[in-house]
Each structure stands twice: as structure tokens, then as C-alpha cells.
Image: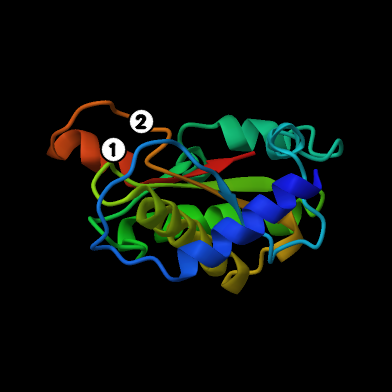
Amino acid sequence: MSIRLLFAVTLTCLLIGCSKDQVKEDGPAEVTDLSADSTTATSDETAAQAYGADSDSGSAFSELDDPQSPLSVRIIYFEYDSSEIRSDYRSAIEAHSLYLQKNPNTTITLEGHADERGSREYNLALGEKRAKAVKQQMLLLGASSSQIRLVSYGEERPASDGHDDYSWQQNRRVEILY
């Protein structure tokens, strides 16, 4: 586990100095937000926490599953090379923040993604920046930092495998996982 922590810290430091003009490199890598929590969970533990809501939520699951609810919007899309939250997603982020306020034992994971253009390191940093932007908005709207975990996959997990504008639009996103 200490090797994972060392790798994550080293990679985070490396990402700070990344430039978007770098040449694209091959191979996946994962970055987790270490600033949100002093303890680091393995990816299996994080996945288990991301899908777990508090046991008291009962009927709240219907609210999460209601397609008419703003909570059904769980993917926030971004413009090219941007981490600015578009105005059409603000109401969804507000609804998720309110839900987290009402359910203090619920945790979510914000997964940041990028399209394939740019270097692997740049895309990891951009995915993290997008996830942090959504987290910051949720915190400003009343959610607790302890309820939100961040992970960046960069270009590693594309929603669409194409190499065109439509595919790139689908891949520039933050996914909200309960």
C-alpha cells in the first residue's frame, strides 16, 4: 500500500508541472485526490464506497432513480480543454449537493475524464481539474468534503472509442457515482 501512496504522490507532483503542449504518451495511469482525506483507500474500497449510500436512505433511492429528478443527471460534460462548469449543469450539481446535505452518510466519487488529445499526463491533470471544479461547486452549495472522493482517469476510460468531434465531446466529462 505504501508503494501506491508513493506512486500517487509522485504522479501528483509530476502533474503540477505538466504542460498541454507535450507529446501524447501511451499507457493508462490513475490519480486520486489525496487532499480530501488523510487516509487513502484502494480502488476496490473506493468503488465500494462510491456505490454505497447510508442505510437510512430507504426511500431516497427512488429520488436518485427518478428520471424526472435533476439527480438523474450524473454526467457533467465540458468544453474542449476546459474545466469550467457549463450553466446547463448547475441545477444538477445543486440537486446533488442538496441530496448530500440531506444524507450525510452518503459518499460519492467524482470521476474526471478527458478526450484522447493531449499527453497522458495533461489529460490526467485536466480530468482531476474537472472533478475538482465539480467538487468545489458542491462544497459551495453545502455538501461536505468528507462525502466527496475524486479520481481522474484522463483519457483511460473513454465513453466513446471514436476519433471524431462527437466521441471527443462524450469523453470530456465528470461522472457522479453514488
Image check: 46 left or right of 117? right
CA gap between label 2 and label 1 equals: 6 Å
Which quadrant is home to the N terminus? top right
**What crowding class fits label 1: few (fewer than 14 Cα within 10 Å), some (14-19), or many (20 or more)?**
many
Q: Secondary structure at mark 2?
A: loop
- Residue that sits furthest to the left in the current view: 164
Q: Which residue is mark 1?
A: 170
Q: Which residue is mark 2?
A: 159
Residue 107: image x %, image y %?
72, 47
Identify which residue, 162 or 142, lies in the foreground.
162
Answer with the quarter of the image where residue 47 lies. top right
Residue 24 shows in the view: yes
Residue 50 vs 7, above or below: the answer is above
Image check: 77 left or right of 51? left
Which quadrant is home to the C terminus? top right
Image check: 57 left or right of 174? right
Contact, mark 2 vs mark 1 (Cβ under 8 Å): yes
Instruction: State the mark number for residue 60.
Output: none
Type of the residue with mark 1: Gln
**What crowding class fits label 2: few (fewer than 14 Cα within 10 Å), some (14-19), or many (20 or more)?**
some
| Residue at (31% x, 51% y) in the render | 119
Residue 67 vs 77, above or below: the answer is above
Residue 117: image x %, image y %?
23, 47
Type of the residue with mark 2: Ala
Answer with the quarter of the image where residue 36 lies. bottom right
| Residue at (45% x, 62% y) in the render | 129
Answer with the quarter of the image where residue 87 lies. bottom left
| Residue at (56% x, 57% y) in the render | 11
Residue 158: image x %, image y %?
36, 32
- Residue that sits furthest to the right in the current view: 55
Q: Secondary structure at mark 1?
A: helix
